[in-house]
Amino acid sequence: VTVAIGWKVMKKSAAFWLLALGFMLVGAINAMIVVNTISNMTSVVMNGETIVTGGHDIAWASAVLSAELVLVVFCKVALGSMYDRLGLIPSTIIGAFTCFAANFFMIFNTTDWGPILGAVFFAFGTCVCTVGPSVMMTKEFGRLDIGKATSIMVAVQSVGGIMGAIVSGQAFDAALSFTPAWIFGMVISIITGVCMVASVKLARKLVAKQIAAGAPRVDEEGKIVEGSVATA
């Protein structure tokens, strides 16, 4: 994006707020899985009573989680490469799918393959939280005011994380099972993908509108080039 958009335009744009909603939901998914992964594979103690969830021992669950954390390192690089090679929409769809798949496989917590596959898919899905905001913001809206706008996006994502942790805890208290939380995660994974894809398409229209309105160009650092007019 070489045309000046900036925060004043972004904050009035549906593209920005759809993206914010998408990242808020991703934050919720991330928190639900992060805070409940071990408990989902092992057991939970409530009021002195042990409720068996996955039935695996702590050592096995810890090994799965450790392998997931190692895989995350490679998935961060992979997602960044996908954004560059495939573009925003295909990468967004893949990210939403991996979040959906992670929640789906978490349901099969009494098996060995369920938690393992859930960890593999979540290793990629969680990278949407860390790699996604800066990349998507820059590619959709350019670099003008990108620091402020991205900070707001990350803050909204953190709010989603708080909500996700609370909702998943309440869901377990009500059902004595994490399955309702994972089903909820599957639903909001789909909503996340829809919001983010719609945001990309609306951002493209916003860029074209700014160019048609004669907005100035910005350089590679996001600074306005005085006296310039952006062209398509």
Image: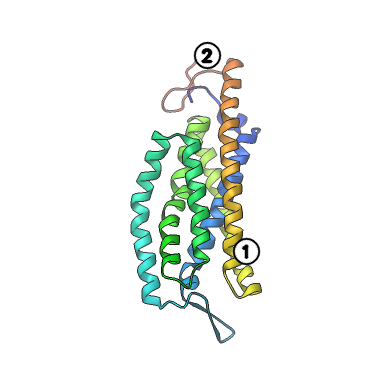
Q: Between 134 and 98, which is closer to the camera in this rendering?
A: 98
Q: Between 114 and 205, which is closer to the camera in this rendering?
A: 114
Residue 49, given in percent of the width and then of the height, sits at 56, 86
Find the distance from the CA under tag 1 to the CA under tag 2.
48 Å
User: SS at mark 1?
Assistant: helix
Residue 97, given in percent of the width and then of the height, sits at 50, 49
| 64 on left or right of 22 | left
Q: Earlier in the sequence, mark 1 or mark 2?
A: 1
| 169 on left or right of 112 | right
Q: Residue at x 41, y 70 (%)?
A: 112
Q: Quadrant of residue 32?
A: bottom right
Within 10 angstroms of label 2, few (less than 14), some, or many (20 or more) residues? some
Q: Residue at x 56, y 29 (%)?
A: 6
Residue 128, given in percent of the width and then of the height, sits at 47, 48
| Label of residue 208 in the image | none
User: SS at mark 2?
Assistant: loop
Q: Between 194 and 221, which is closer to the camera in this rendering?
A: 194
- Identify residue for label 1: 167
- Identify residue for label 2: 229
* Residue 70 shows in the view: yes
Q: Residue flagged by tag 2: what amino acid is it?
A: Val
Q: Residue at x 36, y 45 (%)?
A: 78
